[in-house]
Image (cartoon, rainbow, N blue to C red):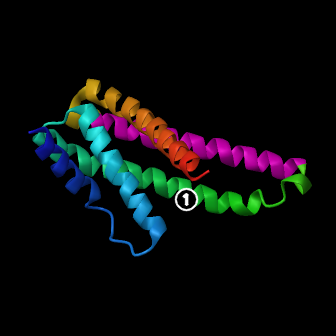
Amino acid sequence: MKKYLIIIAIAFGLANFTKAQNPRADKKEKIESLKVAFITEKLDLSVEEAQKFWPVYNKYTAELEKSRKDFRGQMVGELKNLDQMSNAEADKALRDMIEFRSKELDITKQYTNEFKKVIGPQKAVKLFVAEQEFKKELLKMLRQKQQGKG
């Protein structure tokens, strides 16, 4: 049952990703697949929960990613010459950074309510814990890979 659930979750999780032909996109897709499997296992989602959860989670991550991409695009110009930045420019950059963090928090608040509706509050908490655990595991794997090359 667990394997079946993971396969379903991966299918739902990857439904929004296009098949890419470049190595960077392939790596991103592989990481997303690992993340879907990791979260599915940590949350112990039933088939019904997975069917409701993954579309909401995919929208959540897409919204966060769009916000981050927009912010990065905006900040590239602002932070180009940090050492020559005036106080007024630095103040604007700080306000923009805080606004970005606030927007991220608003997105998370909105989707936390959606997660509670589809998987309940306990699994919603487990979701955010699982995301942090996944990031730690991913960093650990990357470090191990880099040490293997060195």
- Residue 121 lies left or right of residue 50; in this view the side is right
Quarter placement of the N terminus:
top left
Q: Amino acid at mark 1?
A: Lys
Q: Residue drawn 48% across and 58% down?
A: 66
Q: Residue drawn 14% across and 38% down?
A: 2
Q: Nearer the viewer, residue 32 or 121?
A: 32
Q: Nearer the viewer, residue 124 or 20?
A: 20
Q: Position of residue 85 (x, y in %)?
A: 87, 54
Mark 1, Cα crowd under 10 Å, few <14 / some 14-19 / many 20+, is few
Give the residue number, with chain letter if any, for mark 1: 69
Q: How many marks?
A: 1
Q: Secondary structure at mark 1?
A: helix
- Residue 39 lies left or right of residue 133; in this view the side is left
Please check the rendered image and state whether residue 99 is part of the magenta-colored stretch, yes or no. yes
- Whether 14 is drawn above or below 137: the answer is below
The part of the chain drawn in magenta is 87-115
Q: Position of residue 139 (x, y in %)?
A: 51, 41
- Whether 135 is drawn above or below 64: the answer is above
Where, by quadrant of the figure, is residue 39 drawn? top left
Per the picture, the main secondary structure of the magenta-coloured stretch is helix
Q: Residue drawn 19% across and 45% down?
A: 6
Q: Residue drawn 21% across and 37% down?
A: 118
Q: Position of residue 131 (x, y in %)?
A: 40, 37
Q: Position of residue 22 (x, y in %)?
A: 45, 73
Name of the residue lying farthest toward the bottom: 21
Q: Nearer the viewer, residue 117 or 6?
A: 6
Name of the residue lying farthest toward the left: 1
